[in-house]
Image (cartoon, grey):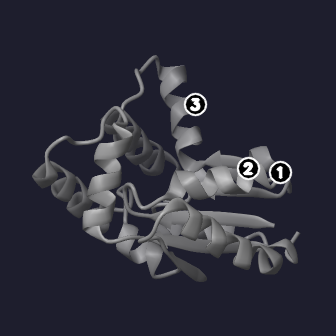
């Protein structure tokens, strides 16, 4: 089973990853490929450096490079992959017949509130900046950019995450038997 997660900032992807981890599924992220590259370059990790690092890697290796790097490191293992942000990454991951892409979807007010509650370094403290960052990630200006709208359109499943963590976990428990059949 190879599950990919896509969704907007603070939609609940990390919470879903943690749930999969509790089930014993290996977790990784397209951002891990970027983090590794940033470290090799001696560049400090931040939201902005992750975004620009991803763009640079895509310019060098193509739109699916981050996913291709992960597939190589997974070597056929079951896993859940967070931070899928381009159709090229989805295309690369679909090379595995057991790949399923899930969009985690939540409204802007819920995501803004979650963003403020979690206080993650790099999260905007101003709602206008939050919305501007989101707008910049919706549609890629070139092949190296993030394209969340086009990536979400490729989803096999959508989980609406407007409630609390218990409701999200309940939805995931309902989905688990279907996904476990892929393993």
Real-space CA distance between mark 3 and mark 1, rounded to the nearest whole angstrom: 24 Å
> Which residue is found at the position 59% from the left and 81% from the top?
157
Real-space CA distance between mark 3 and mark 2, rounded to the nearest whole angstrom: 21 Å
Q: Nearer the viewer, mark 3 or mark 1?
A: 1
- The vertical placement of 75 against 176, above or below, is above
Dot 3, crowdedness within 10 Å: few (<14), some or many (≥20)?
few
The answer to whether residue 53 is left or right of residue 133 is right
Q: Residue furthest left?
A: 128
The answer to whether residue 175 is left or right of residue 45 is right
> Which residue is found at the position 42% from the left and 49% from the top?
59
**Which residue is denoted by mark 2 in the rendering?**
21
**Which residue is denoted by mark 1 in the rendering?**
24
Where in the figure is residue 28, as x and y percent of width and height? 66, 46
Q: Nearer the viewer, mark 3 or mark 2?
A: 2
**Which residue is denoted by mark 3 in the rendering?**
36
Q: Are marks 2 and 1 in contact (CB under 8 Å)?
A: yes
Provide the secondary structure element on which disc 2 rests: helix
């Amino acid at each position: 089973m190879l599950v990919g997660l896509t969704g907007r900032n603070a939609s609940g992807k990390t919470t879903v990853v943690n749930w999969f981890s509790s089930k014993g599924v290996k977790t990784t992220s397209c951002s891990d490929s970027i983090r590794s590259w940033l470290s090799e370059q001696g560049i400090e990790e931040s939201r902005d450096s992750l975004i620009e690092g991803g763009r640079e890697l895509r310019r060098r290796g193509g739109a699916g490079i981050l996913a291709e790097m992960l597939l190589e490191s997974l070597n056929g293992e079951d896993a859940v992959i967070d931070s899928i942000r381009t159709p090229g990454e989805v295309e690369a991951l679909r090379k595995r017949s057991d790949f399923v892409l899930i969009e985690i979807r939540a409204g802007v007010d819920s995501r803004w509130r979650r963003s403020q509650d979690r206080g993650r370094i790099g999260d905007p403290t101003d709602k206008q900046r939050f919305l501007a960052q989101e707008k910049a990630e919706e549609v890629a200006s070139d092949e190296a950019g993030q394209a969340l709208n086009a990536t979400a359109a490729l989803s096999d499943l959508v989980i609406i995450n407007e409630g609390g963590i218990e409701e999200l976990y309940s939805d995931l428990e309902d989905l688990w038997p279907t996904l476990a059949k892929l393993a």
